[in-house]
Amino acid sequence: MSRTAARRAEAGAGTAGRTTERTTERAPGRSTERSTERATERAARRAAGAIDRATGPAADPAGQAAAGLAAEVQRWQRRHGRHDLPWVGERDPYRVWLSEVMLQQTQVASVLDYYRRFLVRFPDVRSLAAAAQADVLAMWSGLGYYSRARHLHRCAIQVVAEFDGTFPADSAALARLPGIGRSTAAAIAAFCFGERAAILDGNVKRVLTRVLGFGADLADAAAERELWATAQALLPRRGIESYTQGLMDLGATVCLARQPLCESCPLERRCVARAQGRPQHYPVKTRRLRRGRRDNAVLWLEHRGRWWLVQRPQSGVWAGLWCLPLLDDDEALAACTQGWPGAGAPLPPLAHALTHFDWTLRPVLWRWPARRKAPAQDELRALGEGRWFSPGEALATGLPAPVRRLFEAATEPG
Ligand code: SF4
């Protein structure tokens, strides 16, 4: 069967929604790609060996074992995959790319609305490339991990400038674009161009390491490379879309991190981790991120119904977003507001978790008396460069999620 015919047949089968837990990716270097290729055959034998060990002695050669696993994933995906999400069966690289980036580190339920609204505002790569970064951030506001939005914008500009608005049609070229890691590139190439490219996001890592009993420590680059090679070796010859989607859906809905639903899993019979009775042991990754803590005072300055916001620097947390001024502590807040008319009213603290630290934000609402003129930028120099926003303007701009929640609560009717 030709690739086109195979893809047509596959499209008839349909695909399901992309998944929830993604890992930060880096594109592989050329030497890594070469060593991955060399390891593929070895990995296929190892993968098949693991499957055979789990299912008992079998006269199943390596290729057949891998094909058997793939076929079960595909069958399951057609019957039980998530077929009701807006990017289901999508073949437009722009839309697949957008959904993949939004789903990195973000739950499907949170992405749905953003995905639809983003496509209304930026229906194609050219409209996104032509937009101001502030508008892109505004559309992303509340979704978190804003570097994704900045990379998305840069990538769109590059696709228009270097590829005349058409995404490259292979995973290696895609992985060289800003913000597109190896797994995202493979997903775009598999779904849109039928390329046999392995994905390995957090969910898929979990499924494969458990099925194969892959116990090497993924904190080691060599183990990570070996898993990539194994994932590549397991790819079916046909139906890459339903296989890729099936692995994603299994990881998101069945092979859950804490309580995998093994009795509903099509791979139960083959699964080494299940046979060992310890799915939660996999994947193995010893080097854990050490989370820090931060605590900041937040000044919510209000005058005649308008709020003073400052723009965050272009690098670091919440880069480029508009935000209430953050101060190191209460002393800094007191120093900054010394001599101001009125008084600050502390509001309940906001807890916010970022990748590297847990953040406590302690807002203080300061109402500048309405009878007095609004303080000008010069008087507010200590807070940074900023301007006054009406609530409507503020909510239409790119805001950090906790600040948005604060404003939304303040503007709720009743
Ligand atoms: S049998 Fe259980 S542990 Fe193994 S892949 Fe399926 S859900 Fe995951």
Image (cartoon, rainbow, N blue to C red):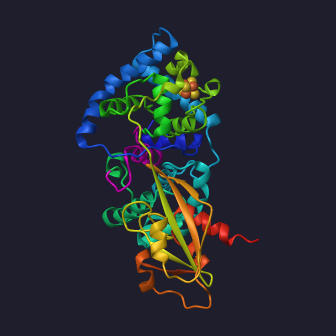
Q: Is residue 177 magenta?
A: yes
Q: Quadrant of the N terminus?
A: top left
Q: Quadrant of residue 153?
A: bottom left
Tell me what residue is drawn at x 61 percent, y 85 percent: 369
Q: Residue furthest left?
A: 31
Tell me what residue is drawn at x 45 percent, y 61 percent: 149
Q: Pick whichever, 36 or 78, lies toward us.
A: 36
Whether residue 107 sits left or right of residue 292 in the image: it is: right
Q: Is residue 215 magenta?
A: no
Decide: is 263 above or below 60.
Answer: below
Residue 384's x, y, as percent? Answer: 41, 75
Residue 381's x, y, as percent? Answer: 41, 80
Residue 161's x, y, as percent? Answer: 32, 67
Residue 60 visible (yes or no): yes
Q: Quadrant of the C terminus?
A: bottom right
Q: Pick whichever, 364 or 117, lies toward us.
A: 364
Q: Which quarter is ligand 1 in?
A: top right
Q: Pick whichever, 386 or 134, lies toward us.
A: 386
Decide: is 247 above or below 106.
Answer: above
Start and end of the magenta stretch? 176-198
Decide: is 64 above or below 359.
Answer: above
Q: Pick whichever, 32 or 387, lies toward us.
A: 387
Residue 2's x, y, as percent? Answer: 43, 39
Q: Residue furthest top?
A: 57
Tell me what residue is drawn at x 45 percent, y 21 percent: 213
Decide: is 293 above or below 327.
Answer: above
